[in-house]
Amino acid sequence: MTRVAVLVSGGGTNLQAIIDSVADGRITNASISLVISNNKNAFALERARKAGIKSMLISPKDYTDRKHFNQALIAALDESKIDLVVLAGYLVIIPPEMVEKYPNRIINIHPSLIPSFCGTGFYGLKVHEGVLERGVKVTGATVHFVDVGTDSGPIILQKAVYVKEGDTPEILQRRVMEEAEWKILPKAIDLFANGRLSVTGHKVHIEGEVEL
Ligand code: GRF
């Protein structure tokens, strides 16, 4: 059984998609052992409570410096014997020592088709604003392993979403979540938990067919 920690900062709709997928069997061989938030007001914490999942608030504000915050974060993962860390709308930079400790065992969801509209400064609504400003007709979401760069790790799954006439960043954000994020993030966790992912260099190989 893969022990999963989900790290969140906000509303937690991706966390909810994971909770629902574990409950209805779209994710097998995995349990959500821990939810960690850096933000005490994150609604994601409420979702964890409702689902009976252990949650922790670990905020940089409560530590004298980043070093101590990073240590607390890694200690929490170690204590819960976490196999897979899922960043689901987590707005804190992951410490390099954590990436080193969990090689190809941290995954992130990004709301664009990487390598477009990603990297420093592209988070939250800014991604969708960038998409609309550039006028691309197709966007989407990407799940990738986390390396020491920003949105630069090996890509696991991607799903395309059409941009429509009259879209606002908010409308587009919602469509990308519904049509892509809430599907590919749970799917990637299921693939990991069932040993179907392997990484060679910068490429992820998936065993068998994947339906999204
Ligand atoms: C999602 O768009 C995710 O891709 C991005 O932050 C947002 C989080 O939303 N990284 P939620 O907290 O899961 O509702």
Image: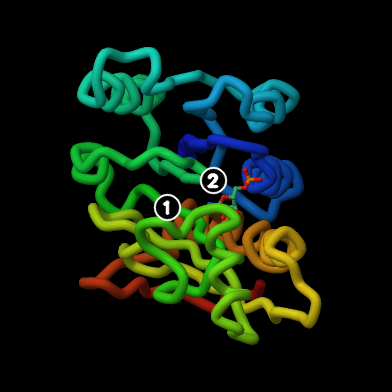
Where on the picture, by quarter, is residue 125? bottom right
Name the one closer to the observer, 162 or 23: 162
Q: Residue at x 25, y 50 (%)?
A: 103
Q: Residue at x 50, y 70 (%)?
A: 157
Q: Where is residue 121 shown, x and y percent of the image?
A: 41, 56
Q: Where is residue 98 shown, x and y percent of the image?
A: 25, 38
Residues under labels 2 and 1: Cα distance?
Answer: 11 Å
Name the one closer to the observer, 120 or 76: 120
Q: Cβ of disc 1 within 8 Å of ligand 1?
A: no
Residue 108 vertical placement versus 68 (above, below): below
Residue 196 disc label: none
Q: Amino acid at mark 2?
A: Gly
Q: Amino acid at mark 1?
A: Ile
Disc 1 element: strand
In the rendered image, which residue does mark 2 sit on?
Answer: 89
Q: Where is residue 187 shown, x and y percent of the image?
A: 59, 60
Q: Residues within 10 Å of mark 2 (few under 14, many from 20)?
A: many
Coloration mode: rainbow
In the rendered image, which residue does mark 1 sit on?
Answer: 107
Q: Residue at x 67, y 57 (%)?
A: 182
Quarter placement of the C terminus: bottom right
Q: Cβ of disc 2 within 8 Å of ligand 1?
A: yes
Which numbered disc, 2 or 1, marks the residue that appears first in the sequence?
A: 2
